[in-house]
Amino acid sequence: MRPKRHLPYLPIYYGAIVAEKVVARVTRTKPIVTQLGAMMFGSDNRHSIEKARRELGFEPKVELREGILLAAAWFNAGGMNQPAVTEASQKAALAGALK
């Protein structure tokens, strides 16, 4: 599944650097966009499970879309006691992942 929208990588990456260095220092909060986040979303993260099926006999119990929804629900319920994130960033991440 290819993304429907293209965002230029470099402005987002450099914006993340500014956010981490300046905004975080001024507001004393973790920025929504980080360098790591920009790098992750700026790379192709699609992977096949064919090798796991072939060599390990793996079969997923849920479809990808349902798995993402379950993971988001777990995260929103406080999964692994993650640091607080904004509701807007959660919605943005889910909107992009479920297209």
Image (cartoon, helix red, strand yellow):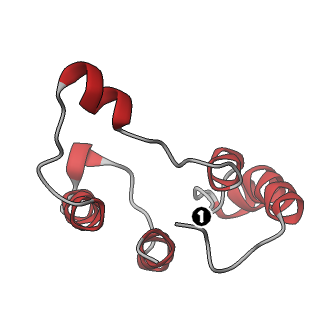
Q: Which residue is mark 1?
A: 32
Lateral position of residue 23 relative to residue 71, left or right: right
For the view shown, which residue lies furthest in the left direction? Answer: 61
Q: Within the image, what quadrant is residue 84 found in?
A: bottom left
Q: Within the image, what quadrant is residue 23 found in?
A: bottom right
Which class describes the residues within 10 Å of circle 1: few (<14), some (14-19), or many (20+)? some
Q: Nearer the viewer, residue 29 or 31?
A: 31
Q: Residue at 62% of width from left, 57% of height from top?
A: 28
Q: Hey, what amino acid is under mark 1?
A: Ile
In the rendered image, residue 38, in percent from the top left (x then y), is placed at 69, 54
Q: Residue at 22% of width from left, 56% of height from top?
A: 78
91 w.r.t. 47: above or below: below
What is the total number of numbered labels drawn onto the structure image? Answer: 1
14 w.r.t. 69: above or below: above
In the rendered image, residue 53, in percent from the top left (x then y), is placed at 25, 32
43 w.r.t. 99: above or below: above
Lateral position of residue 51 relative to residue 71, left or right: right
Q: Nearer the viewer, residue 7 or 92?
A: 7
Q: Within the image, what quadrant is residue 7 found in?
A: bottom right
- SS of the residue at dot 1? loop
For the view shown, which residue lies furthest in the front direction? Answer: 54
76 w.r.t. 60: above or below: below
Q: Residue at 68% of width from left, 48% of height from top?
A: 43
Q: Nearer the viewer, residue 70 or 30?
A: 70
In the rendered image, residue 99, in percent from the top left (x then y), is placed at 46, 78
Q: Residue at 26% of width from left, 46% of height from top?
A: 81
In the rendered image, residue 24, in percent from the top left (x then y), is placed at 69, 56
For the view shown, which residue lies furthest in the top direction? Answer: 55
